[in-house]
Image (cartoon, rainbow, N blue to C red):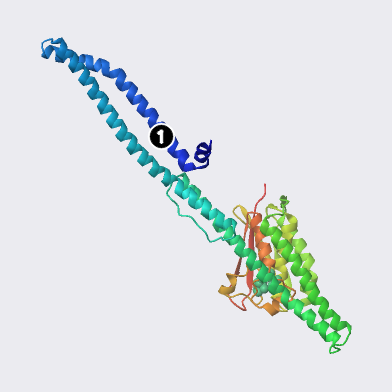
Amino acid sequence: MKWLSVIRSRLSWKLFFSYLVVILVGVAVLFGTAQFHTTSALTRHIAIMHALLSDDPVLGAQLDDTFHDAVNEILIVSTVAALLAAILVSIFTARRIVEPIRAMMRASIHIADGDYHERVQVPGQDELGGLAQSFNRMADTLERTEQRRMELIGDVAHELRTPLSSIKGVLEGLVDDVLPAEPATFLSMEREVARLQRLVQDLGELSRAEAGQVLLEIRVSCPADLIHAAANRLRPQFDDKGVSLDLGVPPDLPQVKADANRITQVLLNLLGNALQYTPAGGQVTIHAWRDSDNVAIAVQDTGIGLSSENLAHVFERFYRVDKSRSRAGGGSGIGLTISKHWVEAHGGSIWAESRGPGKGSTFTFKLMIGA
Ligand code: ADP
């Protein structure tokens, strides 16, 4: 039946008919009870009237009938009035319930079509209000994700442009015989290719970290061992540059819950940065200490330092204070972003401090103590 399928496909009709059923049941009960109860109430009333009208049987029967009719008339009129009022109210309330749902439906169609600005009005504090709030939150997240995606594509294109144009320049120089085909020329090209390779590698790592795709292998680990291993790996480079590397790690440092590989990566990134941004003759120190339920690890350097404005941005993707300096050191500008992801994936936190340019910087992160 067509009308039945129309009713089934519309929430407003369904709500309206459910109200109507409730009203009709109410009316039937009202009618039944009135009919059932009227006889005994009337009998009592008529007995009193009979007594007052000195037992005239004709008058008594007439009184009986008119009273019955009057009760029925009152019941019918009030039932029709109540029915009309109830129908009007149910149409109004059904609309009020259905309208926000319709608005969400329209907004979700726009979002599905790629328009992420769409939001709905929150109709109140009830479940529908909660649904509208969740809907708006979902739209916010989608919009931010899309924005990040667009920014990432723009940033990556920008990052690829410099090494690619310098490789292209060298190749054109070779073709035109402006540059000599000697090892130095090929070495400069090889450096740019290595930079591209590092960028691609870091981007892969970053996207995996951002998508939460990498499962951490959390084990109870000894932070002192991780610090010593990372320091030993980079010590030759510190010696080559003439920057001293000291450790201030107490022997009774508690164990932490950590994925040893990821935390080693964080330590190598912080140490590598400290080495890169500290001139020869400078000093880098790794401190570690217990801080209530955590172990804090700080990499402190006497290098170029950071202004308060730079401090607010260093963990952002592709942020570099001095682009040419970072590039010269092979930096992709996403090392700290990846480190932040790893530390936060451990439930920890990471931050940077500096007393200003030229006054060194300290990068500290905290990990939870393991059982
Ligand atoms: P990069 O690969 O460029 O080093 P990072 O994400 O590791 O990228 O660091 C981002 C930026 O933060 C760097 O380009 C640099 O400007 C700044 N930075 C990081 N570590 C230090 C430090 N120890 N001292 C001064 N500046 C730093």
| Nearer to us in this view, 278 or 62 | 62
Q: Is residue 120 above or below residue 327?
A: above
- Under 8 Å from ligand 1: the CB of mark 1? no
Residue at the spot 61% in from the left edge and 60% down from the top edge: 145
Q: Is residue 254 above or below residue 9?
A: below
Viewer can see residue 315 = no
Q: Position of residue 221 (x, y in %)?
A: 72, 52
Label 1 crowd bin: few (<14), some (14–19), many (20+), radius 10 Å: some
Q: Position of residue 177 (x, y in %)?
A: 86, 89
Residue at the spot 46% in from the left edge and 50% down from the top edge: 100
Q: Position of residue 11 (x, y in %)?
A: 49, 42
Question: Residue pushed farthest right?
Answer: 182
| Nearer to us in this view, 320 or 223 | 320
Q: Is residue 227 above or below residue 71?
A: below
Name which residue type carries label 1: Leu
Residue designated by label 1? 20
76 horizontally vs 252: left or right:
left
Check disc 1 and report its element: helix, strand or loop.
helix
Q: Quadrant of residue 346?
A: bottom right
Question: Residue pushed farthest bottom?
Answer: 178
Residue at the spot 61% in from the left edge and 52% down from the top edge: 293
Q: Quadrant of ligand 1?
A: bottom right
45 horizontally vs 356: left or right:
left
| Nearer to us in this view, 291 or 95 | 95
Number of numbered discs? 1
Residue at the spot 18% in from the left edge and 17% down from the top edge: 63
Viewer can see residue 321 = yes
Q: Position of residue 82 (x, y in %)?
A: 31, 34
